Each structure stands twice: as structure tokens, then as C-alpha cells.
């Protein structure tokens, strides 16, 4: 396991190049052997006796804290700021906190024997630092979500962890049920009861949710599902990234029904993508999948975030009903969206069933009425026409070669410099795609084996000349993309 930190005085989106490091902190001989030739500056036991300092002033397991002390000197950081973060990390145990601080300062002092390599200064306008998972969870809270149910499964678990710890401060009920089937069923039930609700999982858990997607579609209850991808099939690569669940997100259950798929491209976009997901889920009374991956959920970045930009649009919710007029929950409308009643609304009672039904909600499967089935199915599917107009086109940048990507693969591409871009966030329904006509080549870049997004685009008549693919658990790096494009 390793961590890569990239710092700049300008906006950056990804971890950057892999071939060269300014500073390597090697905690093991193996790490030193593998990466030493790629580093300009090295911190290891050879430069600073990290293990000895940790054992003498705290515990051997605090070797990483000793390394942090040495790194603080090498980068020219103010150690007082780092101490604040150490104490915050170990705030639950004062004794452990004090020991780590002691190790940190002893190592920092020892490291003064080696030259300082950089002078990293504190920015004048501090910004929020958060992971992709935290950005999604924050977006859900800012969007007015009041119920979240999920069974732990990496890499979606950090969303559950953050909400379990912080959600109660914002009135969010968080439940860990017995499995993913129960998780989505509870979210559907909470939404039916009138609150904004969501669930989250990864590939294997999403498999178990398919039947419930069909239920939500038939009874037209809005629900948001976070699908955080990892390498498959089966248990696959629990701690490594992949973008191989796109086909499943496009077809999350049997039959035909309207839904939406949104894949935030960088961490800043996470909260707003979630806000859009909740709004269109309720306005169109559909399921919306927020499609991310391990690279997205576990990457950490400073973000620009404006809470004032969040607006809740709950759609056609029946506030009260005139009893003398029969309430038809699934009334045929021009848009396909019918007025939704929350339990307890006077005169707003109706039947919600998984069977096909008429406008009142009465099932028709005990009799042959094809005209009702035809009308109800058309009513639901009509939502896609208007929804497609709300899906934003990709971010496009002119270039001789156009790199096309979706979701987190957009991050390293944003740092690639002069290459042309077409980066998608809104995936389904597919928005209008107007690629630069003068491009010599259109290349789709994905972290999967078969090029699922390339197949999806070509099926919609979008030009694709070449595919650049990666499927062994690693995201693309900037230097890698510069060579391949």
C-alpha cells in the first residue's frame, strides 16, 4: 500500500505522474527498493532512524508519525500546524496523542541534520479538504436527505461511515440492515413515506438490489443509489478501482423503465451531482444511480464548495386533496409524471403494488386489459424524453485528439495539458453530444476491459476511433495518458 500526495499553487485534479517523485518516504526496505530510482529526495531509515525514534519516545507503530516529522522539515512546513492535525486524529486518547506528538517533534528535530528541500507555505485562503466519499455524503445532507440505509461494502462504505458519525447532526437517520436487499427496500419505504432517501453499495451488493429497482420503477417512488465500483466479477478486487459496472447501471433490473445515471467527474462536483440526483429523482419519480469508483471515493482533494447553490426541487407532491374528486396516483399526464401523495394526506390514499395497475393503482393482472398496460407503460417511459433535455452535455475542450471519458477518469485527463477533451458526468439518458468536427482522432479512455462506454456511445451514433483501456486495479496517471494519447 502506498499514498501519493500532490501539492500545487493552482487547481489540480489528480495524483499526477507516477514515474517521478519529488520526495519518497519509504517505510520499508521493499518500498525503498521499488521506488528509489524514481525519487529526487528520499526519507528512510538511512536518513533518519524512524523506528528507533518511534520506539524510544512512543511505540514502534508510530514509525509513520516519525516519518511525518522528517517530512515536515524537508518540505519546510510549520510543525505547529501538523501538531494540530495529529492531536485531532488521536483526540479520543490523550496519552496516545501526546506520544505521537513527542515522536513527531523528536524526528523533526533529528531531520534538521539533512538539508531542507522545499518551502511549502500555508495558503492565505484555507479550503475544505475532503475525500470523494465525504463529498457525496455532504451533498446528500445538503440536498435534504433524511434517511440512509446501507450494508458495508467497499468502496461505498466510507459514505456510510461519514453519515453514521455526522448524519445525526443534520437530522439524518442512518441504518445498517442485514443485507443490501433490505437496504434498498428500506430506502424505498422511507421515500414512499415522504422523506428523501438513499442507499449505497458496490458491485456484488448492487446485484442483490436489482429486483427492488423494478419495484421502485413500478410504484414510481424516487430513490438515490450510490454505486461505487471496484474490480469484479464476484468479490474481485475489494480495494482496487475499476469502471466495469456501467452496463449494469444502464440496466439495473429486468424490463424497461425510466431511471438516470450520473457519474461525478472530480471531487468538487460530487455534492452538486448528488443534489441533481435527488432533485430529478423526486421530480420524475424515478431511481437515480450516482456512479463512482474506488479511485473517486478514496481520493482526497481541496474543494470549492458553495452551500448556497443547493436548491431542493421535490416535484409534484400532493399537499391536500379534494375528497369529492377521486385521487388517481398514476394519472396519465402529458409529461408522464403524476401527482404523488404522501401517507396521511387527506383523500390521498392509494395502492402501491409491484403488479401492473391502472391510474388508481388497482392491479390488472387478474384480467386482460392491454389498453391499460399500453397506456401506463407509455406514461412511465415518457419521462425519459423530458429528462434527456436536463442531462448536461460533456465538458468539451478543442484539440487534434479528443479524449473521451466519464466519471473519475476525467481527473487525470484534466491535468494532461493540450489534449482535447469530452468528459461526461450525465450518462443516462445520454445528453446531446457535439464533438469537435475537426478532430483527427476520438479516443475513449476507460478503466475496464471491453470499453463499455465506447460501446454505449457507438450504439448512440457517436464517433469512436480508438479505445485506451486499463483493467488491473489502477487508475490512469497523467504521464501514462500523455504517452497513450
Image: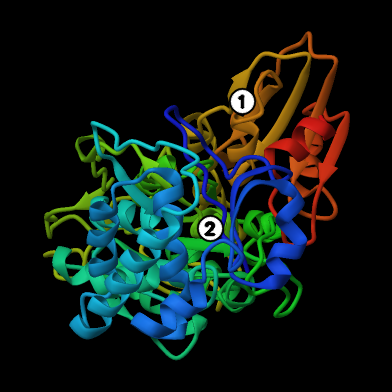
**Number of marks in the rendered image:** 2
Q: Residue furthest front?
A: 113
Helix, strand or loop at mark 2: helix
Horizontally, residue 175 falls left or right of residue 373, namely left
Quarter of the rendering occupied by the C terminus: top right
Q: Position of residue 110 (x, y in %)?
A: 41, 62
Residue in view at x 69 percent, y 71 percent: 29
Q: Left or right: where does residue 219 sit relative to residue 414?
A: left
Q: Is residue 145 left or right of residue 296?
A: left
**How far apart in space, not on screen, are marks 1 and 2 (Cα)?**
33 Å
Tell me the quarter of the picture where residue 164 sits.
bottom left
Q: Nearer the viewer, residue 283 or 320?
A: 283
Q: Looking at the image, is 176 positioned above or below residue 310?
A: below
Residue at image position (78%, 8%) is 438
Residue 432 seen by the camera? yes
Mark 1 or 2, nearer chain start: 2
Callout 1: helix, strand or loop?
loop
Q: Are marks 1 and 2 in contact (CB under 8 Å)?
A: no
| Residue 242 or residue 183, whichever sits in front | 242
Q: Which residue is mark 1?
A: 432
Query: Which residue is painted at 79% across and 61% down in the image?
Result: 472
Q: Position of residue 355 (x, y in %)?
A: 52, 73
Q: Where is mark 2, residue-wise? A: 372
Is residue 73 shown above or below 478? Answer: below
- Which is closer to the viewer, label 1 or label 2? 1
The answer to which image quadrant residue 175 occupies is bottom left
Residue positioned most to the top: 438
Left or right position of 182 against 406? left
List the single residue furthest toward the right.
Answer: 465
Amino acid at each position: 500500500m502506498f499514498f501519493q500526495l500532490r501539492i500545487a499553487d493552482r487547481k489540480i485534479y489528480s495524483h499526477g505522474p507516477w514515474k517521478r517523485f519529488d520526495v519518497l518516504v519509504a517505510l520499508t526496505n521493499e518500498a525503498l527498493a521499488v521506488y528509489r530510482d524514481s525519487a529526487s529526495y528520499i526519507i528512510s531509515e538511512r536518513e533518519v532512524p524512524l523506528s528507533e525514534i518511534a520506539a524510544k519516545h512512543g511505540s514502534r507503530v508510530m514509525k509513520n508519525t516519525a516519518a511525518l516529522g522528517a517530512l515536515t522539515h524537508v518540505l519546510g512546513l510549520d510543525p505547529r500546524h501538523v501538531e494540530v492535525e495529529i492531536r485531532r486524529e488521536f483526540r479520543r486518547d490523550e496519552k496516545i496523542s501526546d506520544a505521537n506528538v513527542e515522536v513527531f517533534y523528536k524526528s523533526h528535530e533529528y531531520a534538521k541534520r539533512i538539508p531542507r528541500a522545499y518551502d511549502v507555505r500555508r495558503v492565505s485562503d484555507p479550503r475544505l479538504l475532503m475525500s470523494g466519499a465525504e463529498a457525496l455524503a455532504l451533498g446528500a445532507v445538503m440536498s435534504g436527505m433524511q434517511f440512509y440505509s446501507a450494508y458495508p461494502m467497499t468502496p461505498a462504505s466510507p459514505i456510510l461511515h461519514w453519515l453514521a458519525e455526522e448524519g445525526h447532526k443534520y437530522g439524518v437517520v442512518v441504518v445498517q440492515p442485514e443485507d443490501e436487499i433490505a437496504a434498498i427496500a428500506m430506502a424505498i419505504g422511507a421515500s414512499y413515506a415522504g422523506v428523501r432517501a438513499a442507499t449505497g453499495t458496490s458491485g456484488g451488493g448492487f446485484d442483490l438490489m436489482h429486483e427492488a429497482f423494478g419495484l421502485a420503477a413500478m410504484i414510481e417512488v424516487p430513490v438515490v443509489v450510490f454505486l461505487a465500483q471496484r474490480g469484479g466479477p464476484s468479490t474481485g478486487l475489494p480495494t482496487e478501482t475499476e469502471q466495469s459496472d456501467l452496463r449494469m447501471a444502464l440496466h439495473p433490473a429486468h424490463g424497461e423503465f425510466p431511471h438516470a445515471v450520473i457519474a461525478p467527474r472530480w471531487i468538487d462536483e460530487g455534492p452538486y451531482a448528488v443534489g441533481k440526483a435527488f432533485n430529478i429523482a423526486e421530480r420524475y419519480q424515478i431511481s437515480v444511480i450516482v456512479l463512482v469508483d474506488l479511485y473517486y471515493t478514496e481520493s482526497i482533494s481541496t474543494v470549492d464548495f458553495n452551500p448556497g447553490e443547493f436548491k431542493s426541487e421535490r416535484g409534484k407532491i400532493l399537499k391536500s386533496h379534494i375528497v369529492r374528486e377521486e385521487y388517481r396516483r398514476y394519472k396519465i399526464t402529458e409529461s408522464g409524471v403524476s401527482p404523488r401523495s404522501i401517507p396521511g394526506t387527506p383523500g390521498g390514499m392509494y395502492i402501491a403494488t409491484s403488479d401492473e395497475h391502472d391510474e388508481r393503482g388497482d392491479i390488472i393482472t387478474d384480467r386482460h386489459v392491454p389498453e391499460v398496460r399500453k397506456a401506463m407503460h407509455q406514461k412511465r417511459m415518457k419521462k425519459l424524453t423530458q429528462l434527456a433535455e436536463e442531462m448536461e452535455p460533456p465538458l468539451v475542450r478543442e484539440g487534434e485528439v479528443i479524449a473521451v471519458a466519464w466519471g473519475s477518469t476525467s481527473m487525470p485527463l484534466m491535468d494532461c495539458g493540450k489534449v482535447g477533451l469530452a468528459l461526461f458526468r450525465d450518462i443516462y439518458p445520454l445528453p446531446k453530444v457535439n464533438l469537435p468536427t475537426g478532430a483527427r482522432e476520438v479516443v475513449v479512455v476507460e478503466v475496464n476491459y471491453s470499453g463499455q462506454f465506447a460501446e454505449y456511445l457507438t450504439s448512440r451514433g457517436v464517433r469512436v476511433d480508438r479505445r485506451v483501456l486499463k483493467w488491473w486495479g489502477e487508475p490512469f496517471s497523467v504521464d501514462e495518458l500523455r504517452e497513450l494519447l
